[in-house]
């Protein structure tokens, strides 16, 4: 069949909106009509050519929501008409990683996903006879896409596509980093570095678990109001701090008779390796945990003095907020529908597929939190 898609034909070129050919789902695959998709940094990272693993031509997009329109042989977990969110981190429930219960990084289709093809090694997309690559196993910048059955989460049918698509990446990453990776609880203190589309979701995750103090750190002063909307209690702009930023943050979080400062949990949501060091050193000696969410540029390295870890701080990282997609994503949709988390104000721009390149411009200018394309 034919479907409209935004295609990245070459690196660092604007996406072209064209009609592409899409083959139907093979065994254990499903075809999904994408109703809405968010535009995320990783799409931009790959399109720009900065991603050394980027493949072209390809159909990007990994933050979508839609409806199953066709199922391949052997598919049992979803049916035609089901509402789903595509998962760039699948959940097969049978590989060693899924069975370990220690990680959400399912390995069952990892190799082919990274090569931009379906698990059988072929692509379902083509344009004028030329193969197009899938992207992060999702390719949500297409009105119709094909995914492995294990890479879709079935969600309730009353959830609005143009909001819950954001649960496909940003919301789950931020909220999940707090709930799954940090396992933060009531009364904790947290520092969130970078109040963008991810950091604001970390802030609301901390509010959800009942944190006492939620400090937001951003070099852009307009982010203060954004942070407060989602539960941030204190704001720090590193540009206006006199002296050492770590000392300033530790000073703000002094508690107890010994007056040792530092947060229980800190989160890097910038992807900047210098910020990652600050985040580690701003967590509490003895038990503080610093969680890296931001994706740094290719070849970047992090550093700190070993003393920081010897004195009991823990450095962690998280992918997709540690969420097991098919299990956790439907619950996060419920949290949204029950008003436990909010999404609507973060979706600052709604675009048509033809306007998708504008979404990337808005991201560059820092004018958007999230732009969503509605098909
Ligand atoms: P964003 O651009 O919306 O937000 C980044 C924020 O950081 C901005 O508000 C910016 O002003 C602020 N910032 C930049 N430099 C800073 C500094 N030195 N100190 C303090 N603040 C600073 O980006 P986003 O959508 O929130 O994504 C953040 C990061 O998370 C990206 O690197 C993205 O690739 C990554 N990410 C990771 C995962 C994962 O699973 N680990 C998933 C999604 C996104
Ligand atoms: C999503 N991300 C950033 C912004 N939006 C993002 C990028 C990469 C990862 C997670 C989220 C990520 C962390 C660890 C891995 N990836 C490797 C997982 C593994 O090896 O099992 C990652 C993922 C998918 C892809 C590449 C890297 C891909 O499909 N190409 C989850
Ligand atoms: Zn993303």
Image: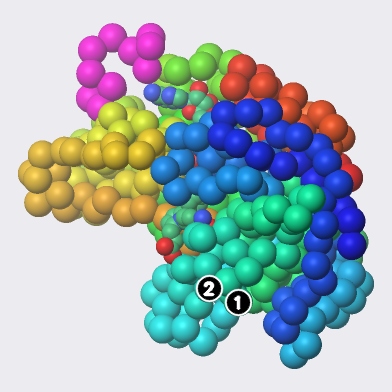
Q: Is residue 176 visible?
A: no
List the single residue furthest toward the front. Answer: 129
In this rendering, the answer to whether 111 lies above or below 198 is below
Q: Is residue 65 left or right of residue 248?
A: right
Which label is found at residue 67?
none
Residue 204, picture quadrant? top right
Which structural element holds mark 1? loop
Q: Residue at x 52, y 68 (%)?
A: 112
The mark found on residue 120 in the picture is 1
In magenta stretch: residue 244: yes
Residue 305 or 242: which is nearer the viewer?
Answer: 305
- Dot 2: within a 10 Å radius of its alpha carbon, few (fewer than 14), some, or many (20 or more) residues? many
Q: Quadrant of the N terminus?
A: bottom right
Based on the displayed image, in which of its 4 quarters is residue 281 positioned?
Answer: top left
Residue at the spot 61% in from the left edge and 17% down from the top edge? 365
- Stretch in magenta: 238-248
Residue 85: % across, % down: 73, 61
Using the image as rendered, state which of residue 372 and residue 178 is in the foreground.
372
């Amino acid at each position: 069949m034919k479907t409209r898609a935004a295609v990245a034909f070459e690196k660092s070129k604007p996406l072209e909106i064209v009609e592409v050919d899409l083959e139907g789902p093979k065994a254990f695959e499903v075809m999904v009509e994408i109703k809405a998709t968010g535009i995320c940094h990783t799409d931009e990272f790959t399109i720009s050519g900065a991603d050394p693993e980027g493949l072209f031509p390809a159909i990007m997009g990994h933050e979508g929501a839609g409806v199953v329109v066709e199922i391949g042989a052997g598919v049992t977990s979803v049916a035609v008409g089901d509402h789903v969110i595509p998962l760039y981190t699948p959940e097969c429930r049978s590989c060693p990683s899924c069975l370990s219960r220690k990680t959400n990084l399912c390995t069952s289709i990892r190799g082919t996903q990274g090569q931009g093809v379906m698990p059988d090694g072929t692509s379902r997309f083509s344009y004028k006879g030329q193969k197009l690559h899938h992207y992060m196993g999702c390719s949500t910048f297409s009105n119709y896409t094909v995914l492995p059955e294990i890479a879709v989460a079935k969600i309730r049918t009353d959830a609005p596509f143009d909001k819950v698509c954001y649960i496909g990446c940003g919301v789950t990453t931020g909220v999940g980093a707090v709930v799954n990776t940090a396992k933060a609880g009531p009364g904790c203190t947290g520092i969130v570095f970078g109040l963008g589309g991810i950091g604001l979701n970390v802030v609301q995750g901390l509010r959800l678990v009942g944190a006492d103090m939620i400090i937001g750190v951003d070099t852009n002063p307009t982010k203060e109001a954004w942070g407060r909307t989602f539960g941030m209690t204190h704001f720090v702009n590193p540009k206006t701090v006199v002296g050492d930023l770590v000392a300033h943050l530790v000073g703000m979080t002094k508690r107890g008779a010994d007056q040792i400062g530092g947060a229980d949990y800190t989160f890097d949501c910038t992807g900047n390796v210098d910020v990652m060091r600050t985040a580690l050193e701003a967590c509490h000696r003895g038990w503080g945990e610093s969680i890296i969410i931001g994706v740094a540029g290719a070849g970047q390295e992090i550093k700190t003095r070993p003393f920081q870890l010897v004195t009991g701080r823990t450095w962690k990282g998280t992918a997709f907020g540690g969420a097991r997609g098919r299990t956790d994503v439907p619950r996060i949709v419920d949290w949204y529908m029950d008003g436990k988390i909010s999404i609507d104000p973060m979706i600052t721009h709604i675009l048509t597929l033809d306007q998708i390149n504008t979404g990337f411009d808005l991201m560059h200018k820092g004018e958007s939190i999230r732009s969503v394309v509605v098909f």
